[in-house]
Amino acid sequence: MTVALGACGYGSRAEAGGVAKVRPHGERTGGLEEIRLGYFANVTHATALVGDREGFFQKELGGTRVTSQVFGAGPSAVEALNAGSVDIAWLGPSPAVNGYTRSGGRNLRIISGSASGGVSLVAHPGRVSGLGDLRGKRIATPQLGNTQDVALLNYLTRKGYRVDPDSGEGEVTVVRIDTKETPAFFRRGDVDAAWVPEPTASQLAARGGRVLLDERELWEDGRHAITTMVVSQRFLTEHPEAVEAALRGSVRTNAWIRSHPEEAKAALNTALERQGGQALPPAVLDPAFEHIEVLDDPLAATLVRQAGHAVRAGLLEKPELRGLCDLRLLNKVLAERGARKVSAAGLGTG
């Protein structure tokens, strides 16, 4: 079972999307009128933002209309998936795993990877001298139980610091702050450091923060899942053709981002401006974009490790992850493109 994370952002408002260049055209995929996507206005959600903006999803879905919602927190996106108000969402590993385990494995499936990397620990250089100087400091994360929160709590536990996972109080204080507010807290000195995703990490660095740790340094081969593509099991069962089309759009988007990085970066910034309300300056956008890797592989083995981190941190108990990933449609799409299939690392279904 899992610990209920009631303070994780359930009920936060989702905003309407609608930034795509392409309109519905042709036959509806599987007769479906509409498919609803959910994602965050973060650089780590580049696949969703760019794919929606450039119309890769819409092109694959033909006459089935693609709509989108922007969420500020993983748990609210999980809630929307469970309620059926969103069909496919891009989530960090911790909300995806927590949502899966809390439902007893009945509600969600990870169907693809999306991004790796893009997370750093950034500190005030005058307040924190280095990684050995964290005792007594206040470190921000986006929210209780989110992927960065779990990563920080695990890191602190491994380093021997005692921290209560729920309150964040202890030898190091973990402060849960919406990433939109983190730069202001950082500037005022209300926190000493922040373990945050892009573009917030690069925003803090551009304002004089010092990057103490790139989370990629803690992972074998420098890869760890930061964003995954998730579908409600009901939608997957009832509309496999639409899910497969969305996966083709995701794979095409990632290939385009890798082969057209400058165009993709510009498209990402336009989408961030439309969805998040503000474009990023080059001093923030350039390093933020470089810090992520878009990919189709969900890096399932790292999902297992991240779940173990949540257990060690005291936020998750006895996770049963078999069935979390259903990569059959993704591997079908990859095979059609002549690409290598990806592994579910023992978490697969079917």
Image (tube, rainbow, N blue to C red):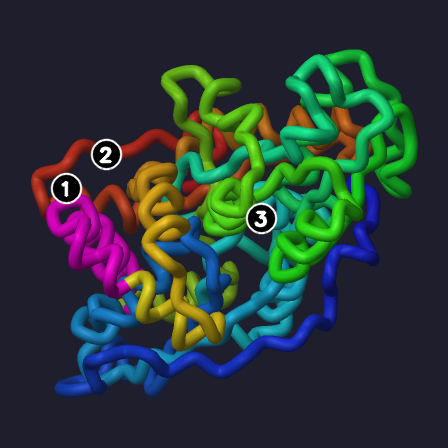
Instruction: Specify few, some or many for label 3: CA neighbours under 10 Å numbering under 14, 14-19, or 20 or more.
Output: many
Position of 111 with respect to 171 (left or right) is: left
Q: CA distance from mark 3 to mark 1?
A: 26 Å
Disc 3 marks a residue whose amino acid type is Ala
Q: Is residue 31 magenta?
A: no
Q: Majority secondary structure of the magenta segment?
A: helix
Q: Quadrant of the C terminus?
A: top left
For the point 16% across and 87% down, the residue is 25
Q: Nearer the viewer, mark 3 or mark 1?
A: 3
Q: Give the SS element for disc 2.
A: loop
Q: Which of the marked residues, 1 or 2, is nearer the chain's N terminus?
A: 1
For the point 10% across and 46% down, the residue is 337
For the point 66% across and 25% down, the residue is 308
Q: Which residue is mark 3?
A: 96
**Which residues are drawn in magenta?**
242-267
For the point 14% across and 37% down, the residue is 339
User: Residue 117: where, in percent of width, then height?
Assistant: 43, 35
Instruction: Tell me the tag on residue 335.
Output: 1
Disc 1 marks a residue whose amino acid type is Ala
Q: Nearer the viewer, mark 3 or mark 2?
A: 3
Instruction: Specify few, some or many for label 1: CA neighbours under 10 Å numbering under 14, 14-19, or 20 or more.
Output: few
Q: Give the SS element for disc 1.
A: helix
Q: CA distance from mark 1 to mark 2?
A: 7 Å
The answer to whether mark 1 and mark 2 are in CB contact below 8 A is yes
